Image (cartoon, rainbow, N blue to C red):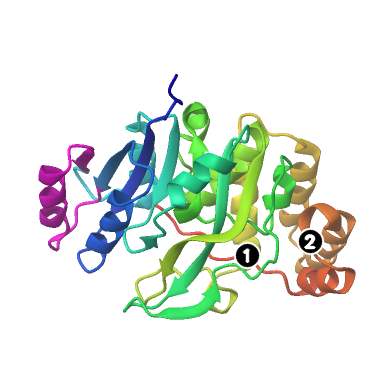
Amino acid sequence: MTNHVPLISIALCTYNGEAFIREQLDSIINQSYTNLEIIIVDDCSSDSTVDILRVYEAKYSNISIFINDINRGINSSFSKAISLCNGELIAISDQDDIWLLNKIEEACQYIGNNIMLYSNSMLIDENGVDLHRRKFKSKKLYSGCDSRALSFFNEVAGHTMIFKSSIKRDILSIPKCSHYDWWIAFVSANLGSIVSLNTPSAMHRVHTCNVSRHLSSIKQDCYKAMLRWTEVMLSTQKLKNRVFFDELYSILSMDNIKKKKLKLLLFQLKYRNLIFTNKGFFSTINRARKLRFAYIPEDK
């Protein structure tokens, strides 16, 4: 009797990625887990990305390429890629990272009955040089089934996630004013449980073309960004703990800035054990005081 080896789909989106796409594809093709299909959606690249993809498609029968008719943006492209996946599990891939060769095998081993699994990643520069730090500094990433833990500090990165295809209907279409990975993680935590591995599964490339989410890069009103993300969370069809999100929305909708700041601080402290998981008391106070939301891009 042979063990069941499920088909796993890789949803990969490209846009002008000629510089790094070969390294990313090679790291996927050479995975220790081999029952893979690779679904690639290109968002009207103007460089040689598509030509490179066609060479790989001709060489590997498990690669399928789809070209958008117009430039549609990252969220729409990933919605399309995910919808085309046929595997029991679906993993998300950026175009410029390098996966560790046991990434998929390890994910299959540990996902268990959880809806989604994600992990940390090592950071490299444009030339592939190790920056000797991880994407997330947390000693323990969140695992569980309470989406409130992902409302302020969502540390789920798309390039590390793998999820069960049973949630496809719930995550499509990805809202325009959200990060696609935040959305998938949030929905997953409302449908079941997510599990994390703090060990790195990929080398994540940091370069000038990355869309930065660091606090120092915020150029907009953070409260407007928080309000938009809260609206997205409230739009979730199977949302748990709605009272929490209604309360947050009510605070963020206030016109008086000083009152809003105070109410938001008190709200964070009230739910500190949910929002600031794995944080000490003084660390919680400091993070609540300094809290700002990262820029949420407008998808096309």
Say if the magenta span includes residue 104.
no
Q: 14 or 178: nearer the eye?
A: 14
Image coords of residue 79 (percent x, y): 39, 39
Image coords of residue 198 (percent x, y): 62, 59
Closer to the eye: label 2 or 1:
2
Q: Amino acid at mark 2?
A: Asn
Q: Earlier in the sequence, mark 2 or mark 1?
A: 2
Q: Is 171 located above or below residue 50 in the figure?
A: above
* Residue found at x 52% / y 30%: 167
Q: Secondary structure at mark 1?
A: loop
Taking the image as shown, residue 164 lies to the left or right of residue 59, namely right
Q: Amino acid at mark 1?
A: Phe
Q: 281 or 152: nearer the eye?
A: 281
| Image disc number at residue 278 | 2
| Residue indicated by mark 1 | 293
Image quarter hosting the N terminus: top left
Range of residues picked out in magenta: 42-66
Residue 66 falls in which quadrant of the image?
Answer: top left
Whether residue 16 can be seen here: no
Q: Residue furthest top?
A: 1
Counting the numbered discs, the total is 2
Q: Is 74 located above or below residue 219 in the figure?
A: above
